[in-house]
Amino acid sequence: MRELVVENQEVLMIPQNFKFANKGKVTSVRAGDFTLELDYEPDGVLENTYCEFYTQTPHGKLYFDSYAKEINGKTLVIASPAKHKFLQRRQYTRIKFIHDLDLILDGNSYKVSTLDISAGGMKLVTGSKLDIDASYELKLPLFGENDMLIGCKFQPIRLEKRNEGGYTVSGQFAYSSNHDKMLVVQYCAKRNVEIKNK
């Protein structure tokens, strides 16, 4: 594990209650544990209670379960996990994400159906020809329809005409806060693990 988790590495931490997701940097690594300095107060994190951890390494995205041996404000001592696995090599985990959503531009609404999503962006189909130079307002329903909506902007990058009519559009997200981006990263990573474990 010591060669996988290194100092200054960014780590995403998801306790059992998803809404208390947090992130931080590794400040030191020892044989049996590592120290993690969190960006936010560790609400919802308890000592000796398992959480999920995700981090990017040269070998791909690393996932493991572990727990905080000590909590001292935002400084946590995390036990070295017994096992770990790599999810995939792309920077952001991409998952199937089927939803009918509205994109808003200058007061106009455009109906779209999403196909997949990552923290970097999404692919969708629509009957409307979207403006590739525009930024569309969007609300992503991540944790159930009525639970949490993440507001962001969708910027089309590639439009392809479909044989059956309409367009397939790939684009990127622009977030108003890093916290929102972190929630999407963690949502995708968690759903990816759930799908693989089915």
Image: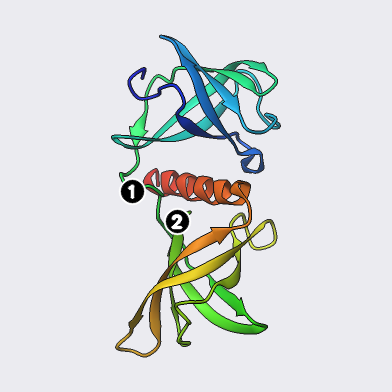
Left or right for 73, reference 135: right
Within-10-Å neighbours for mark 2: few <14, some 14–19, many 20+ = many
Q: Position of residue 132 (x, y in %)?
A: 44, 78
Residues tagged 1 and 2 counted as in contact (Cβ below 8 A): yes
Compared with 78, 30 (above or below) is above
Q: Is residue 38 above or below residue 96?
A: above
Kindly identify which residue carries mark 2.
118
The image quarter in which residue 156 lies = bottom left
Label 1 Cα neighbours within 10 Å, binned few <14 / some 14-19 / many ≥20: few
Q: Residue at x 43, y 68 (%)?
A: 171
For mark 1, what is the residue? 90
* Chain-order first, disc 1 or disc 2: 1
**Mark 2 residue element:** loop
Q: Secondary structure at mark 1?
A: loop
- Nearest the viewer among 136 and 34 is 136
Query: Residue 77, position in %: x, y?
Result: 56, 16
Q: Quadrant of residue 94?
A: bottom left
Against 105, is 123 above or below? above
User: At label 2, which amino acid type do we have?
Assistant: Ser
